[in-house]
Image (cartoon, rainbow, N blue to C red):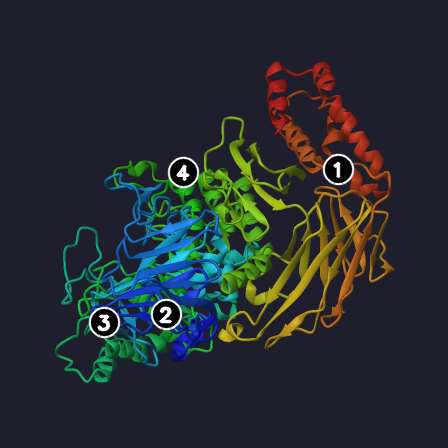
Amino acid sequence: MRVIRAAVAFATFVAAVASSSAHADPVTSGEARFTVLTPRVIRMEYSSSKQFEDAPSLVFATRGNAGDVPAKVSHEKGWLVIRTDLLTLRYKEGSGPFGADNLTVESKQLKPAIAWHPGLKETRNLGGTARTLDQVDGDRHASDNTPLDLGDGLLSRDGWHVVDDTGSFVFGDEKLPWVHRRACQACTDWTFFGYGHDYVAALGDFTKIAGREPLPPRYAFGYWWSRYWNYSDSEIRDVAADFARYGIPLDVLVIDMDWHTTPGLASGSDKRDIAGQTPGWTGFSWNRSLFPDPQRLLRWLGDQGLRITLNLHPASGMLPHEDAYGRFMDAMKADRAHPLPFEAADASYMSALFSTVLDPLQAMGVSFWWLDWQQWRESKAMPGLSNTWWLNHVFFTHMQQTSDKRALIYHRWGGLGNHRYQIGFSGDSIISWGSLAFQPRFTSTASNVLYGYWSHDLGGHTFRDESDPKTRRVDPELYVRWMQFGAYSPIMRTHTTKNPNLRKEPWRFAPAEFDALRDTVLTRYRLLPYTYTMGRKAFDTGVSLVRPLYYAWPEDDRSYASGAEYMFGDDLLVDPVTAAAGSDGFASQETWLPRGDWFDTTRGRSLHGERALAGRYRLDEVPVFARAGAIVPTNTNTTVSVSHDTGARTLLVYPGGNQSATLYEDAGDDEAYRGTAFARTALATERTKQGVRLKIAARDGTYPGMPTSRTWSVAFVAVAMPSKVTVDGVALPRADDDKPGTWRLNGRDLTLHVTLPEHDFAHPQVVDVTWPTDAPDVDGLVGQMRDVRDAVAWLKGHWEDFGGIPDELSAAAQADLLIDYHPDRFRDEVAAFRNRVAKLDAILAAAPMSDELKAGFRARLKPRP
């Protein structure tokens, strides 16, 4: 047995992105070199001059830190053989460049088995992602109707994938690692991944050799407001005040390019600046007619708890009209009479740009940068280097090294390896139902290259050029559905083009639409502790927050054909509504539930998996299915931004079997989470026939500013009235005000709310709930009560008889209130409701109403499978 080990670390940059320490020793055979990076990953190099590359590449930035990998190396009848626990590589020694006759990688242990050789075609790659959704309608380019190419991801149903790194750029050992060409451009450099259908292991391996998926600041998981508009100081203040006025939390305010002067952007202008670009796209100086005192505005916004990002199109570089032009040129030791062209691959240029222009703006109050590079694809100084890729690296790494805040940028996908630089800006998608239908799949598939933080223009950006300008208006239903997807996506950000008719502020919509939009944003904040915990999991494992079903069910063909469905973290399956409702006001949607037991959150019922579910959903309903028994940590107060979060948490406990979960926490906006500055709280349930026990463990770990105590709440979803609730063995009284040390059952959603006494984090807490032996079965009751309630409300809206609707209908519609008013009669009130529902047909038959009204009423009570 020979252990292949690590040799050297990669300075500060590697420390920031690495997963472990130690460097695998390569095995050389003549002009060939092989390095076992993990039991599933082998690097294969061939160089006729034996010029092997040891520097980290732009993709595999941390492969020198893969860790100790047990492997057997032998020479058998002229063949070099390397065996890991899972793979066997054979190379015919002295046989020259790699080919089908001299190199193989096999595995009989993996499922499916692998028998690879050079030239073998990969036929079932599961896709990666694309640079942008600019002018994409659905999954096709609007200009020519060609499909959007998502390229190859790391995962394939074939069970293997090869990344060809031949001729790629490498990093130097500078403080901010800079790009360099390889000594040998033509030398073969392949990295073979063999994983069978263990996709999660493959992603974890990639993090070891290519760097981790960083955890964004906690505020990034909140709501972002963005609009392409020439906002003024006063208008921005009004927008921020309106969010507060309507009780809609907000964490990030995006100011598009009109923050700076924009000469030459008038419609039809064909002017060019001295850099050859359209004047005004690039800008680094505040537009003082809009922002007379930008520092005061940024200070005020900061006092409201808002983070600010400004848009940058840096292609024209620093031009003479910019405020900082003189300082920049002096830093470059250049003649002010001759402006310098922009070049991201020029270390001196970028250093001067940061020190004289961008860093002072951040010191003024800009939180991070929205890079919006739309110009030439490759560096002019270093052809072949993607400007998008390189700008992401430089901006993100510079922030890591110069700020005490957690690094964050906001830009397009540059290519493999860009997962180290979140967050992605997906660009200017076309406003259509097709675009909404495509974005969930686009987002989840990107996790196949670890690009787990796509941010979309929720609601779409613009209409097709050929569309009628008179019809370019926001479709409220489409916008609500897009926002609902946004609540269950990596980043929730609205945006639109500069069109006075495209207004997406929630308070501009009709009451029902406003309610749905506001509730959607509140849902986002309710789930923030869960999403942040899953963000940490992505950092630890490489499994993104939004991921396809086939990660967990790789042998189920339906998980590959599930369309817009995806897992949102470990415990929530989401299938956003992506089509308009019918004339009855319901949107039809079929959802595939994989193997296992699930809880339908819209209907309040338990379901067995391995089935297709045909659902009908109101405007304010989203098809979300929780794993049976799931424990989901949430915010207790959903109306405040991250900066005003008091730390109160509510644990949602869904019906089902025993489960466990973890709540992850850290300081929220520093890089110390990469080390040991974080805390975890373990959560677990134990169920019996008549009760459930929830264990909240003592917190494990510390971080700066960590509170010492907390008031927990627990929400047991869709349950009957309990007979007893205790915390640490002490019985709690029932109350209606959620005071610490009390409980109540909410009749509307049949959720048992237990507010625990405040306690020290150093001690565990145990919650026990017991139900009476004659407790009624309430599975599905929440959905049924809502259907009756909404049907009666519809009937009242169309009823013209002065006598009023039948008494039994009124009583059935208020079953939830009757439960709240008479908790001691819970069993009887449930029975009374079900009895009234059973009599609905008879009640309708006797009621003095038209057949049309009866049909409309029945349609709203149509069973939802």
Q: Which mark identifies residue 61?
A: 2
Using residue 689 as the reference point, say whether residue 617 is left or right of it: left
**Residue 526 position in % (x across, y down):** 60, 55
Q: Quadrant of the C terminus?
A: top right
The answer to whether 480 is drawn above or below residue 304 in the figure is above
Label 2 vs 1, first from the N-terminus? 2
> What is the C-alpha distance between the residues marked 3 and 1?
66 Å
Relative image position of residue 335 (x, y in whole percent): 14, 82
- Label 4 Cα crowd, 10 Å radius (few <14 / some 14-19 / many 20+): many
Q: CA distance from mark 3 to mark 4?
A: 45 Å
Task: Kindly tell me whether residue 283 is visible in this rendering.
Answer: yes
**Which residue is the site of mark 3?**
181
What residue does disc 1 label? 778
* Label 3 vs label 4, nearer the camera: 3
Give the image location of residue 498, x and y in percent: 32, 51
Q: Secondary structure at mark 1?
A: loop
